[in-house]
């Protein structure tokens, strides 16, 4: 009997908006964004908030309550916000997922209602996964509160939790309804979280945009000193590069190529090996240092550019080495090397790793030489020694 | 700062293939279908099989093993097939989902590997959900084994499990890599499962295709007597209508309209109220009878067509009534009425119910009158009485 062919394309559209003081009474960005759904009736909304954000911004819950009361014709909270712990470690606990799903069920949040998630990348990943699988997908508004989530993870199309000891083992591709970056949240960040997200900007600059790299280098001191205007510019450009890339060839990553994952094969494994005590951005900085050093040892990038990149990471306050880089598994191999296999298994298809031929230009390879990886690690260990004593 | 706009469309394509004896050594359909990925290397494959199918087809596991051995250059089983219970009730047990995810993890099934699921609609829903969320989506080949799954659920783009006592509470939209309908599996079906899926054909015929309805009516006796050629034709046309509809305006159901859910608001609730002892197709037959009767009481469809549809359902052996239709909740209201709210919450947006103005033509309404629903239920109760005694 004749084969039946199915063939369609699903269009997706969302905006990444920038503001300051989103929940101040006169700020209409949120209601304007929600009004894009052209709904005549009031919208049901459930907030999910990162406990770290709620603590760092003590007035936030009251502000949100006043805001939704003042805009009661546009949106209605179905319940008090759910407050959940943030940070990568919270993605290891399936109970948090269950809490959000139970709220969606109990409070009748439907496919045309909104989950509004406020927090760092981990909280957004978790809330996004819940939103993606409840009723086969309810609308999600992301309000990222860290540099990392405002310039990278929060503006993309993925969500996830960890399982089987593997980062992001469970998740989906699910574009948000909208993303709103409120720079006031950045004021409350610890230095670690302020710094952490800069590594993703360096990453995307290194593989795609030399001019952006040069501007980061020029602004390094201001960034380290927490100059807000400089940081806002960095976030905007970095988010723009991520959005452009994702909307490009392969938004749902059906092929093997993952240019945006430069520096990430080691980073993901290091997060796990350090039991998520490393921030994602800190792990990415080390992953970049490792793959740039490997690129140099491989004869790709030249020595001055290699030195310069490592110097920039250090000037911004990043470590280039953690003891877990030289941790050995039972087979005597460096544990981090296992990250290559896990990276391939997670992404699927042929191993595809982005390396650098020069600043601004990435090159994909399909093989990494374990001896050369170890050599690169030893180089970083030595380079780091003046700063910290590795506990090997 | 300037808003960043994201805008893209994701293309999806898959075929629904028809065969007999898929795992006979000389049948190359499976390897031909997998070869569409243009991969040069051998494909990793994990089979997930409905225990009911494994029991009804005792040689199946051996056949699959011989088949994969004979085609070792094309595909490689990463482990023995996972055998899991089928039937809607199995979607209530999160352990089954966990079993499949653990297998995907343990055996290194990646985003370019395949989960091949063989079974009825429930097993395919469950396996499809696991495939959709592991590594953010691994490739899924569905091999539906019942009439219902071959002509409806198995050829679409959804997956799900039940949660919080609600059918399909968790799930995603995730088009399969391919669907292969092997009619030999139909030979082993119990009469209930042979019959059950015919209700979905009547459903889609009633709302979309009068000629198809007339052909089902003409073939009713042959279908009831398990004439295979007639059933194959019914399945092909029904699958075709479903595939066409899904690929049409709104594959991922972002709007409020759900024409294909004709008869389903009551069906979903009845499955839950009967603790899933009703097959989905049996529940749909009752749901159709109910909404057709409501359409008639409402003055939409005329009496002769109403009579004729109920007569066809009965000729095929469907019940038009179960005692759970008149079960009352604590508030004294019929429990099934609560299904309207759950239906709306699950789909989102405005309540939108498909009714009939005539055979072949559906009409959407946004309100159902509870008294009229009850009147329709009483009508069906009375009509059924010659056949079974409702235990009220």
Image (cartoon, coloured by chain):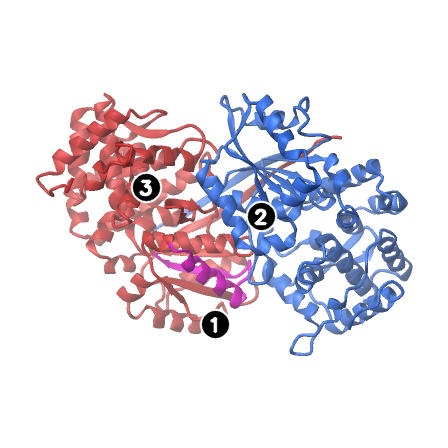
Chain colours: A blue, B red
Picture layout, residue A165 above or below residue A66: below
Residue B225 x, y percent position in the rendering: 15, 51
In the foreground, B186 or B219: B186
Pointers 2 and 1 within a single chain: no
Residue B368 x, y percent position in the rendering: 31, 26
Residue on which the image places disc 2:
A126
Kindly identify which chain the residue marked by label 3 belongs to. Answer: B
- Circle 1 packing at 10 Å, graded few (<14), some (14-19), many (20+), is few
Q: Is residue A318 left or right of residue B76?
A: right
Residue A325 x, y percent position in the rendering: 74, 67
Circles 3 and 1, Cβ within 8 Å, touching? The answer is no
Query: On residue B268, which mark appears?
Result: 3
Pointers 3 and 1 within a single chain: yes
Query: On residue B72, which mark appears?
Result: 1
Q: Secondary structure at mark 2?
A: helix
Q: Secondary structure at mark 3?
A: helix
Looking at the image, which residue is at 21% across and 24% down? Answer: B297
Kindly identify which chain the residue marked by label 2 belongs to. Answer: A
Q: Where the N terminus of chain B falls, by quadrant?
A: top right
Looking at the image, which residue is at 35% across and 40% down? Answer: B241
Q: Is residue A278 left or right of residue B387?
A: right
């Amino acid at each position: 009997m004749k084969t039946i062919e199915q063939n369609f394309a699903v269009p997706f559209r969302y905006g990444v908006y920038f503001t300051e003081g989103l929940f101040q009474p006169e700020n209409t960005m949120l209601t304007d964004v929600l009004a894009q759904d052209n709904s005549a009736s009031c919208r049901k909304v459930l907030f999910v908030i990162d406990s770290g954000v709620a603590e760092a911004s003590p007035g936030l819950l009251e502000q949100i309550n006043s805001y939704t009361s003042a805009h009661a014709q546009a949106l209605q909270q179905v319940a008090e916000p759910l407050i959940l712990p943030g940070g990568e470690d919270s993605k290891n606990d399936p109970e948090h997922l269950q809490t959000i799903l139970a709220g969606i069920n109990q409070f009748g949040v439907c496919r045309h209602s909104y989950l509004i998630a406020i927090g760092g990348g981990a909280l957004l990943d978790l809330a996004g996964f819940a939103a993606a699988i409840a009723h086969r997908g309810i609308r999600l508004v992301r309000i990222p509160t860290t540099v990392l989530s405002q310039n990278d993870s929060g503006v993309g199309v993925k969500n996830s939790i960890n399982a089987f000891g593997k980062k992001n083992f469970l998740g989906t591709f699910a574009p948000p309804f909208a993303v709103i970056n409120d720079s006031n949240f950045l004021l409350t960040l610890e230095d670690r979280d302020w710094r952490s997200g800069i590594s993703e900007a360096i990453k995307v600059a290194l593989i795609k945009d030399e001019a952006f790299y040069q501007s980061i280098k020029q602004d390094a001191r201001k960034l380290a000193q927490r100059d807000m205007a400089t940081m806002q510019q960095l976030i905007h450009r970095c988010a723009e590069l991520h959005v452009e890339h994702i909307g490009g060839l392969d938004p749902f990553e059906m092929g093997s190529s993952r240019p945006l994952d430069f520096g990430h094969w080691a980073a993901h494994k290091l997060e796990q090996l350090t039991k998520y005590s490393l921030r994602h951005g800190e792990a990415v900085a080390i992953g970049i240092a490792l793959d740039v050093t490997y690129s140099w040892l491989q004869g790709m990038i030249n020595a001055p550019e290699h030195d310069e990149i490592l110097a920039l990471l250090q000037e911004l306050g990043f470590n280039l080495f953690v003891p877990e880089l030289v941790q050995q598994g039972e087979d005597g191999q460096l544990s981090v090397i296992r990250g290559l296999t896990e990276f391939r298994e997670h992404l699927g298809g042929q191993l595809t790793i982005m390396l650098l031929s020069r600043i601004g230009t990435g090159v994909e390879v399909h093989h990494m030489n374990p001896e050369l990886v170890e050599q690169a690690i030893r180089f970083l260990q030595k380079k780091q020694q003046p700063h910290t004593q590795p506990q090997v």
